[in-house]
Amino acid sequence: MSSIPPNVSSDPASQSAAVPASPSASSPTFSPLYQQIKALIMQRLQSGEWKPGELIPSEVELGNRFKVSQGTVRKAIDELAAENLLVRRQGKGTFVATHHEARSQFRFLRLMPDSDQPQVTDKKVIELKRLRAPAEIARLLGMKSGDSVVYVKRVMAFDGVPTILEELWLPGALFKALTLERLVEYKGPMYGLFETEFGTRMIRATEQIRAASADADAAQLLAVEKSSPLLCVERVSFTYGDKPVEVRRGLYVTNRHHYQNELS
């Protein structure tokens, strides 16, 4: 027996589609057509049909494929571009965003220099090891306590000055092949490595920001006095399907930098 209720079309080209209502809902909710097309494009991105950096079909081609107007496709793509999942290039078309692009490399790093002068960035990996996930890390990654995780500790310096101390926890099964040697020899953005070699693209993140003070270890690695004020940023990053794939804790020295975000 068909699970589709009478008078509700399963074709994405219908003007709205019923979303199953919760038991407490008195009526179904409806998704605008462009949101349905956006979801279909997201499915293609998640499945890898269009890979990072690749050109996707034109709006006309997608309209023909999904049997909707070009304007509907354009609105869906506009939202995906605003979310940094797609990139429009004048005269060239629309491409799948990649962490290897210069504009994307600092998308998840909101620490900005107080001056406008270009900075030389250096990354030093302190350690990489495999361990059993502490309870809180497991919870944030949607894993069981004690499951395998990869732990990474590194320092980022700007113009030779240590500025960020980071600790990362990654699902062990997903990043089984990640080694200290590979991380040290890789010179591009870390998320670019995750995208290229592990098929994992970070598409959004949540952050918590609080004041902190440097303990003995952080003070030594960041070349500051013990108990110096630091900015602590704790982040959970997600890939397609809203799946958490990274927990990151960063300690920032803000003598010459500030945290910047845009609110709209």
Image: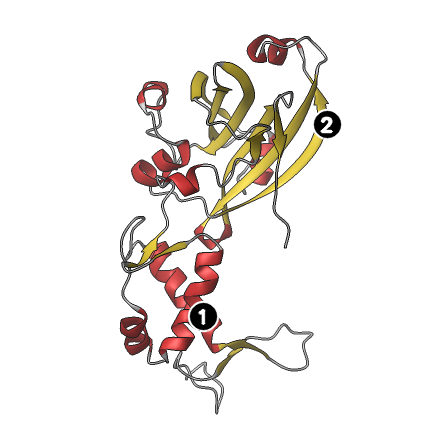
Q: Is residue 78 above or below residue 14?
A: above
Mark 2 to mark 1: distance in Å?
Answer: 40 Å
Which picture quadrant has residue 114? Answer: top right
Q: Image check: 223 left or right of 159?
A: right
Of callouts 2 and 1, which one flags the residue occurring earlier in the amino acid sequence? Answer: 1
Secondary structure of residue under mark 1: helix
Spot occupied by residue 44 in the image (x, y as percentages of width and height): 34, 61
Q: Could you say which is closer to the camera, residue 163 or residue 174?
A: 163
Kindly identify the residue that appears in the image at 36 percent across and 37 percent down.
192
Scheme of image coloration? secondary structure
Q: Is residue 205 above or below residue 71?
A: above
Kindly identify the residue that appears in the image at 59 percent across and 9 percent down.
223
Q: Which quarter shows the N terminus?
A: bottom left
Q: Could you say which is closer to the camera, residue 220 or residue 43?
A: 220
Residue identified by numbered label 2: 211
Kindly identify the residue that appears in the image at 43 percent across and 18 percent down.
125
Q: Could you say which is closer to the camera, residue 6 or residue 163?
A: 163
Q: Which quarter shows the C terminus?
A: bottom right
Which picture quadrant has residue 120? Answer: top left
Question: Residue most toward the bottom?
Answer: 7
Badge 1: how crowded within 10 Å, few (<14), some, or many (20+)? Answer: some
Q: Is residue 120 above or below residue 235?
A: above
Q: Amino acid at mark 1?
A: Lys
Secondary structure of residue under mark 2: strand
Q: Image check: 83 left or right of 54?
A: right
